[in-house]
């Protein structure tokens, strides 16, 4: 049979290409995609060609082999239905609704090890948010928020909003978010932030004068925000850097208060768990928590746009030219 796949072929240019898919072999399953989610952060760097060409697409996801060298397939949030089984696959897989960390593609072969059956009570729309929710859980684990802390989150894209939703469950003293777009700030307040401001705002006015921020998350994707995050962090405070800047340089002022304030910059990336958690935490445990948080937050309400798969170029163009219009963009197959 034939499948349709999205290929990134040049900066700001994608193509939908037909490809042959053989029948599933031993241990394989054939999945028909129902919908997939476009990452407004990572995929926009990919779409704009702002990623190192010699960097691996992913070092932990088998369906993302290769490098960021055009042309290539990318994407990592697909929901579909198993429509055919190869020899040796348990019959209960037939017809299952599944999630896969897979590029945007109408049909694809996979294995049971690479598919996640949707848990009871989780809709296909909610399941699309699993990668971002797992990232938000990982960020929270790395940040280790404490009771009574003053916390600031830069960036209220999907990862930022989900992180805000998780932080709002902690008994913090103050939770402040920062984003350039008014719509995102409104959603952030609805999720539990006490204040949500534009990047140009005087953030010190929203924090205790003596303490500053105890914990700051930089999730905006804008390198300039990292310098602002450092500037508002109090003595021995920690800044969790969850943004991936791609090839965009980050110019930091590390010659003034950073050194004497003993600030800590901590990289957080969902491919791995912090080593100090390894004795008790595993990726499976973190994944279970992510599914639980999806049930709690119900993130499908953040879907702002649905495009037919054939309109994918239009979807990427809109995200590139008018990011303020979108929260989550979904392709429907």
Image (cartoon, rainbow, N blue to C red):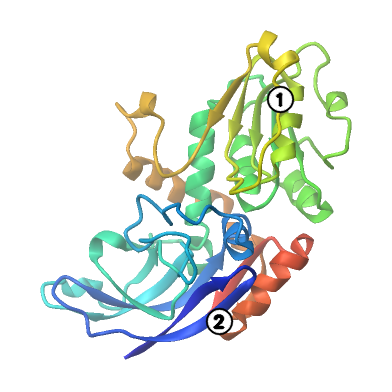
* Numbered tag placed on residue 230 in the rendering: 1
Q: Farthest top residue?
A: 260
* Quadrant assignment for the N terminus: bottom left
Apparent side of residue 117 relative to residue 106 in the rendered image (left or right): left
* Numbered tag placed on residue 309 in the rendering: 2
Residue 221 in sight from this viewpoint: yes
Residue 64 screen position, x and y as percent: 38, 61
Kindly identify the residue that appears in the image at 45 percent across and 54 percent down: 54
Out of 196 and 225, give the one closest to the viewer: 225
- Mark 2 or 1, nearer chain start: 1
Judge whether 285 appears above or below 266 on screen: below
Q: Farthest bottom residue?
A: 1
Q: CA distance from mark 2 to mark 1?
A: 41 Å
Out of 135 and 239, give the one closest to the viewer: 239
Question: Local crowd at mark 1 within 10 Å, few (<14), some, or many (≥20)?
Answer: many
Question: Local crowd at mark 2 within 10 Å, few (<14), some, or many (≥20)?
Answer: many
Out of 164 and 23, give the one closest to the viewer: 23
Kindly identify the residue that appears in the image at 74 percent across and 61 percent down: 323
Residue 29 screen position, x and y as percent: 25, 75
């Amino acid at each position: 049979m034939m499948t349709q796949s999205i290929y990134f072929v040049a900066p700001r240019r994608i193509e939908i290409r037909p490809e042959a898919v053989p029948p599933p072999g031993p241990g394989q399953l054939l999945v028909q995609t129902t919908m997939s989610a476009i990452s407004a952060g990572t995929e926009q760097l990919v779409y704009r060609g702002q990623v190192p060409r010699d960097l691996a697409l992913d070092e932990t996801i088998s369906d993302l082999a290769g490098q960021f060298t055009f042309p290539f397939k990318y994407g990592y949030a697909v929901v579909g239905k198993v429509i055919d089984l190869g020899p040796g696959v348990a019959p209960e897989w037939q017809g299952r609704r599944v999630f896969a960390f897979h590029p945007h593609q109408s049909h694809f072969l996979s294995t049971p090890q690479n598919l996640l059956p949707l848990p009871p009570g989780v809709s296909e729309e909610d399941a699309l948010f699993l990668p971002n929710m797992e990232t938000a859980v990982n960020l929270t684990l790395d940040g280790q928020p404490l009771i009574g802390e003053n916390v600031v989150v830069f960036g209220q894209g999907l990862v930022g909003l989900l992180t805000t939703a998780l932080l709002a469950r902690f008994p913090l003293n103050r939770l402040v978010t920062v984003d350039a777009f008014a719509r995102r700030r409104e959603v952030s307040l609805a999720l539990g932030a006490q204040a949500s401001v534009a990047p140009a705002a005087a953030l010190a006015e929203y924090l205790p004068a003596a303490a500053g921020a105890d914990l700051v998350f930089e999730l905006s994707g804008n390198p300039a925000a990292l310098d602002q995050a450092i500037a508002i962090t109090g003595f021995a405070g920690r800044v969790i850097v969850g943004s991936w800047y791609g090839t965009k340089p980050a110019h930091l002022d590390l010659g003034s208060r950073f050194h004497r304030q003993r600030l800590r910059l901590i990289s957080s990336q969902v491919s791995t768990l912090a080593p100090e958690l390894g004795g008790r935490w595993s990726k499976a445990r973190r994944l279970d928590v992510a599914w639980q948080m999806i049930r709690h937050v119900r993130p499908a309400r953040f879907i702002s746009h649905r495009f037919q798969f054939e309109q994918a170029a239009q979807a990427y163009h809109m995200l590139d030219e008018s990011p303020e219009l979108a929260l989550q963009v979904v392709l429907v197959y």
